[in-house]
Each structure stands twice: as structure tokens, then as C-alpha cells.
Amino acid sequence: MKNGVEQNWHATACILCSINCGIEIEFDGRQFKRIRGDKNHPVSEGYLCQKAARLNYYQHHASRVKQPMRRKADGSFETIDWDTAISEIAEKLTHLRDTYGGHSIAYYGGGGQGNHLPGAYASAFRAALKTPYIYNSLAQEKTGDFWVNGKLFGRQTCHVTEGIEHADYAILLGTNPWQSHGFPQARQVLKQIAKDPNRTLVVVDPRRTRTAEMADIHIPVKPGSDAFLLMALLGVIVQEGLADTDFLEKHTNGHEALFEILKSVSITDYAERAGVDVALVEKVARGLAAAERGCTRHDLGLEQSLHSTLNCYLEKLLFLITGNFGKEGCNNLHTQFVALIGHSKEPEDGGVRTRVTGMKEISKLFPPNILPAEIDTDHPERVRAVFVDSANPMQTAADTQAYRKAFAKLDLLVVVDVAMSETAALADYILPASTQFEKAEATFFTLSFPTNYFHFRDAIIEREGDTLPEPEIYQRLVSAMGLLPKRFPLLETAAKMQRRYPKLDLFPKALGITLALRPQWKNYAAAILYKTLGKVLPEGKQSAAVLWATARFYANRYTKQVRRAGYSGKKHMLGEALFDNIITAGTAVPLSTHTYEEVWELVRHKDGKIHLEIAELFAEMKALQSESTPLTEAFPLILAAGERRSYNANQIYRDPDWRRNDKEGALRIHPADGEKAGLSDGILARCESKTGAIEVRVQFDESMLPGYVSLPHGYGQQYPDAENPDTILQNGPSINLLTTGDHCDPIAKTPYHKFVPVRVQAI
């Protein structure tokens, strides 16, 4: 036994969603023979879904990239060595930076659901590029929510979690946790709520999903009308005097102005526009207001539909005006061990805007929707190079055709990935990364409250081919750009002493002196830690160097909460104890334990209150009443592009054989709509938007709301035919051939993927 695991089983974590459940893998050579849930994992406790059981298809597939590659003049690729790749890329990037400025280079990605350590080291690389531009999936999904959090709680880094496992009244909006999870042991929690007559589950979704089938109340909201439903719910609470005024007076400001708007809402009219019976709206509003422990949870169904930023605000108002915040079973803020996002100022306060489209930065991120326009232009300050890490925007970002056209205009495209993705196929250089099981790795989705956890994972299989972990790639690039020396002898010695005699605290002092003497190195601190402290960490754990600094900072900021989690030590030794546990435990470890009263310490406004008045959203709320329907006769159906299903998982699985069903990613449509369009169940059809058209397999599904169709995400990849490797096949629909970059939220530019007007015709 080792760390409570049998010797032939290796403990790690799933990498498919933000929860990162603990798993154990049994090997047969290099193949994942069996995968099971890790019962010793303190968060997932052995929980496992069907997608995680197929992870061998991620590790082993025909599209794996195993050597650095460079595009030749004829468009084909040739293999090159790492020194050549690094030196040439560094030279080209340095030239672009010095000739056109750092804003001529964009960085896209920086890790996935389970590999966030690369992003920590990419900070030094981006500093070397002097680029302000970071594009990633969070900015395609969540920045509207982050922006709202900043207005409400004081910083865009404030993030809301939900205590669904303890709630007696839970509302799920635009989310299907039976498939998407989103909170620990999601299916178990849903079953528990369904069995308990004293608890109520409400699901708001146009489709009768598996989660909706388990609900006490299913609200089949009309696609795109979430804002009307939410306004109606809030209107009932305010107009019937159900708001928690004591809570609002004590903990918020601006509720009077908010109530003036909500008092004028025509509940019957708004319910009708949402396609929902007004009696059902009243029942849910009263149920949440009366609950001792109520909470809400939303996801992409709300964040990528019409009024997406407003939707995120209105959803939060549901738990705030009913006082369901700062208590067990309610919504709460939580700490973040390593920040995935930052806080951005508004442009009028000095915040960054892009040079071409003028889009403002939110949470230090920029939305992928605007990137093609930032490239495909004659503007003198356009983006000329893109560096992509662990992302595939050619498939996942809105408007694939616009991306193809824009990327063809780049001076340089570099892709770091484990596979020959559709984006990598267009690159000038491809740098092969080690898989998430071939290197030490971690997720920064530390989303739990009151006890928060972090899982640092060891490599469990040898690296295949000539691949490197991303932290090593980044430090090599920074060094090749001439910004750091090859070695730091004094810091290396101090690092050895730090690990041997941590009480002396020599390394922080030496590092502080070094950066004081060389202030130009401060932005490259992550690379310096990797090259010094990383060298003296246990074998294979070099990339944990940044976590040492993070653990010390976290322990200093949340000292009493870290002690509650079981750690001891004075001053810096508390952080050292936390770090040592992280890198040696082999599983998730507790970081801190807060009390519910301490939630208010996480609110970042100077007055310690939640600020409810947001001028931009107040204006949008008032304008709702006069809004007209966006549907046309030419495109009478609404497509939800990116549905979560049993066998789809972003772009991480490229071999379609991993799917046990729905191998073609069928278009789901209500039988009445199908028959009206002259379709038959199972036939091939053409799904067309104003942007493009794709071929789809039709599946009649009575759980769909009439007028509403859906296609899954995670399809459309190119892969070689097993019997004839020279033949390239496509795995299901490429949904972003149907989407556009300008069909998006006005504040965050979040694409309206859940509201794409289309028509479907038989082929």
C-alpha cells in the first residue's frame, strides 16, 4: 500500500470537468486497464461518472503529437529538435514584440480543466512578450458573471459557490448537473434531494433533461427568455413583500432603487413572454423566499443565451434579496488558492482596451469572439501572432470560418498541445506537451466552502516521445529571449537550505534581495522559482515551485482558517506545512476552513456590503418591456449549440470510439418540428444558420420544447481512419460553423451559443 492505494493502482484525478474527482488507474503496460473512483479522496469519496472511465482514449490516440514540428514552405510539417524550435520561436516573437509592440501578440488558452500549472508559468512568458491579451474559454463563458461579481462584491475575483448538498430549496438554471456535474458528487446529491419530501428541486431548462426529470418542479422556459422569467420571479418576491429586508438593510446597499424597478414588473406579462404559467412562477418565488436554506446555481444555459450578463445578475438577486447568502445550504463566496482570473478596472479608470475593436478587459481576459476582428484588419496595431496553449479555438470559438480567415493572415502561430488539433494543423510550430498523466499537475478550481481543497497530482506514467511539460517549455522560451540567465547559483543554494532548514527562511530573503537588485526580473518570478526552488523539490515535482509561494501567501492571508484545517506552525512555517502536505499527500488536501460568518470577510467593497445597484443592468432591465422577438421566418428554430450529453467532453477526446452512444452527435428535435420540416427520425439533414450549414443526423426527442433543437459540443474533430490512416474523417458536427462572433452579449461579448436561429431541411 502507498497513500492508501494498492500498489498496482495509481491515484490521480479526473481531468474532464471542474470538479476533478479523485480516481485510481490500473495499468496494463501503458494502457489504462481499469479506472475506478478513489474512495480515499476527501471530496469525491469514490464518485465516478461514465466519462472518466474512458480516459484511456485521452492518453492513447492516433492524433498524439510526440515531437516538435515546423511547417515547411510546401505546407507540410517536419520534425525538429527542441533547441531549434525554442530558439526560432523566441527570435520571431522577440522581433514582433520589438517591431510592433507587445499588443501585436495574443496568448490563447493556458490550461484545461485539470492542467492549470502551465498557466502559472505562462505569466512569465506573457511578461516577456509584453502582451496584455489573454484569450481563453473562461472568457467565452464566464466573464459576464465575473463582471457582475465585481460590481456586487467589490472584485471580479470574488466567486459564488452554492451549498446544494445542504439546501432545502435549490433552483438550477440553465444547467444539467446529471451530465455536467459542477458540484461534488452531483448525481448522488440530486438523488438525495429527489428522495427527501422536505426538500425541493427546481430546474429551469427548455428541455426535459435527466436533471429536470428528477425535479419537483420543471420550468420549461422559452429559449432566450430567461431574463423575463427571472424578472417575474423577482417581481413576485418584491411585490408580495417576501424579500428579507433585515438582511438587505444590514448587508447591502442600493436595494431601494432595485425594488423600484421590480415593483413595476408585469408578472403575468413577463411569465407569458417566458412561456411559463404565472401560477408556477408565483409558486417558485414564494418557495424560495420561505426556505430556511435556499440556493441557486446557473451555468452556460444562462451565460450563453440572450441577456447573458443580465441573467447572471438576476440569478444572484434571487438569493440575495431573499437573504439566502452567508449560511449553510445557501450561496456563499469562497477563497481561491491560485487565482485563475484577476480584477480589471473599467476603461475610464485606466483599464485595458484592445487596439482594434476597443473591447475592454474583464478579469484580465479578453473574449475569443473578438479575436478574428483583431487580426483580420489593416489596422496598424492589429494582432500579428497568436500563441495557443492547450486550446483549440478553430473548433471551440464562435465562427470557425472567421477564425480560419484570420489565422491565415498571422505572421506567426505557435501551438502547444498533446494532439494534432484543428488549430495545431494551421500552426507554424507545434510544441508537443506531456499529457496530464505524464507530468505533475493540478487544477485551480478550488471552489469549495466552508472547507476548501487542493489536489496536486504526481505523474503516473512515463512521458511518451520527445514531449515536455509546459512549465519547462515556458522557462526555456523566456531564457531564449535573453531575459534571464541560464542559472541562479546563489538562489539555488538558498533553495537547498530552505528545504533543509525551513525555519531559517533563507530562500525568500535571497529571492527578495535578488529582485531588489534586478527589478526587471520581478515579472519572471514564476520562471525563477522553477529554475531554482523547483530543482530541489522531489523528483517530478519541479512545477510545484509556484505552489510554494502560493501556500505561504495563502497561509498568511487566511491564517486562522488554515489552522482550522489542521495545520500548525508560526509565521512562515504555517505556509511551509501547507506546501509540504500539498506535494506529499498524493490526494486532495484541505486548505482552509471558514465559518459562515467569515463569508463577509471575502466581500471586497470597503464598506463590507454587497452593492446591488448596477447602472448598466438597471438600464437593460427597464428596456426589456419593449423588446421584440428576434426570430425570423427564414430561421424559425432556436439551436442550443453545445448541449452536455452522456458522451461528450469538450475537445479532449479525439477518438470517437470512446463514445458508447450518440457517436454522430445527433440533432435533437421535437417530433412535431421534425414532421413540419419534412424530416424523419434518423435521417441526415442540413442545419443552416445565416453563417453556414452542416450535415447532421436527426433524432426525434419529445423532451425538446417545440421550436427548440440542440447539438452537443465536443464533436467535429478530424481523426485518421483506423483501417486507412491516410484517410481523415470527421467526428460529428462542427457547431461553430453555425455561430457568429457578433451574436453576443453587449457587455462581455459572450456568444449566444444557446440561441442560434437556424432552419433544418432534409438532404
Image: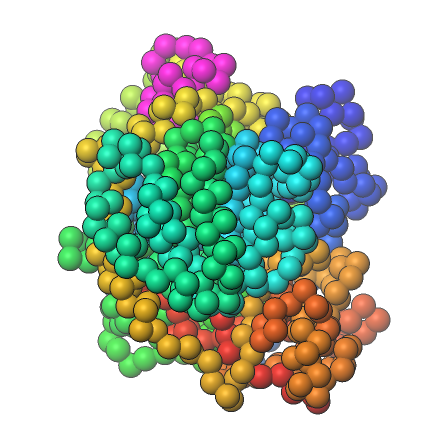
User: In the depicted view, which residue is nearer to us: 173 or 745?
Assistant: 173
- Can the viewer see residue 341? no
Residue at screen point 45% across, 22% down: 593
Report the span colored magenta: 550-572
Considering only vertical position in the picture, is 37 above or below 56?
Answer: above
Residue at screen point 71% across, 50% down: 51
Looking at the picture, the colour scheme in use is rainbow
Dominant SS of magenta comes to helix
Percent coordinates x, y for residue 89 in the rendering: 43, 61
Specify whether residue 558 is painted magenta: yes
Left or right placement of residue 568 versus residue 200 in this view: left
User: In the depicted view, which residue is nearer to us: 543 or 579?
Assistant: 579
Q: Picture quarter containing residue 625?
A: bottom left
Considering only vertical position in the picture, is 751 above or below 687?
Answer: above
Percent coordinates x, y for residue 82 in the rendering: 53, 54
Q: Quadrant of the N terminus?
A: top right
Residue at screen point 59% across, 54% down: 218
